[in-house]
Image (tube, helix red, strand yellow):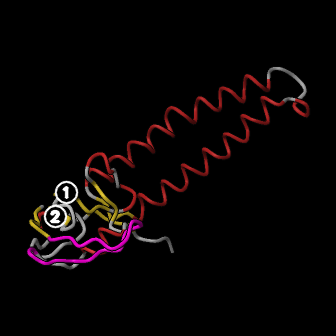
Amino acid sequence: MAKISYYSEEGLQKLKEELVRLEKIERPSISKQIAEARDKGDLSENAEYSAAKEAQGMLELKIAKLQDVIQTARVIDESKLDTSKVLLFSIVTIKNLKNNAKMKYTLVPEQEADLKAGKISVTSPIARGLLGKEMGETVEIKVPAGVIPFEIIEISR
């Protein structure tokens, strides 16, 4: 049985768009490359043909994995999540008590993490340290640079 994974509506839509791109654009492109390489003659010594067949195999594997992820994906209704504690899809404002720097992160599934957009994976050290905590709590989180105390300033959706 495949592992169930949780996504936002936006995250699942991105996966579906990627699958369509692979099936409608990449697959025909590789088929064309194989046909062109086949037309060049002896297949036993045709490096282009071998490379195109290998690329086709890798693409089909990627498509199969993506189809499996989409089939087992579950969308979480973010509007029904409790904002009294830090959970998946919480938007959390924290303050580093060592340097008073404030940071705002959205906790997302690992596949949707994007640090530039302020989305951190729930499996990251900071997110793991925040999960289940409430506003106003101080938590000490072990990060590669050591242990840093953070205060939870705000939790929202």
Q: Which residues are magenta?
A: 135-151
The kind of secondary structure the magenta stretch mainly shows is strand
User: At numbered mark 2, what does the secondary structure look like: helix, strand or loop?
Assistant: strand
**The residue under label 2 is which amino acid type?**
Lys
Specify whether 140 is left or right of 79. Answer: right
Residue beneath disc 2: 95
**The residue under label 1 is which amino acid type?**
Met
Q: Position of residue 156 (x, y in %)?
A: 10, 63
Label 2 neighbourhood size at 10 Å, few (<14), some (14-19), many (20+)? some
Q: Which of the 4 image quarters holds residue 85? A: bottom left
Residue beneath disc 1: 103
In the depicted structure, whether residue 10 falls above or below residue 145: above
Q: Earlier in the sequence, mark 1 or mark 2?
A: 2
Image quadrant containing the C terminus: bottom left
Q: Position of residue 117 (x, y in %)?
A: 27, 47
Verify whether residue 13 appears in magenta.
no
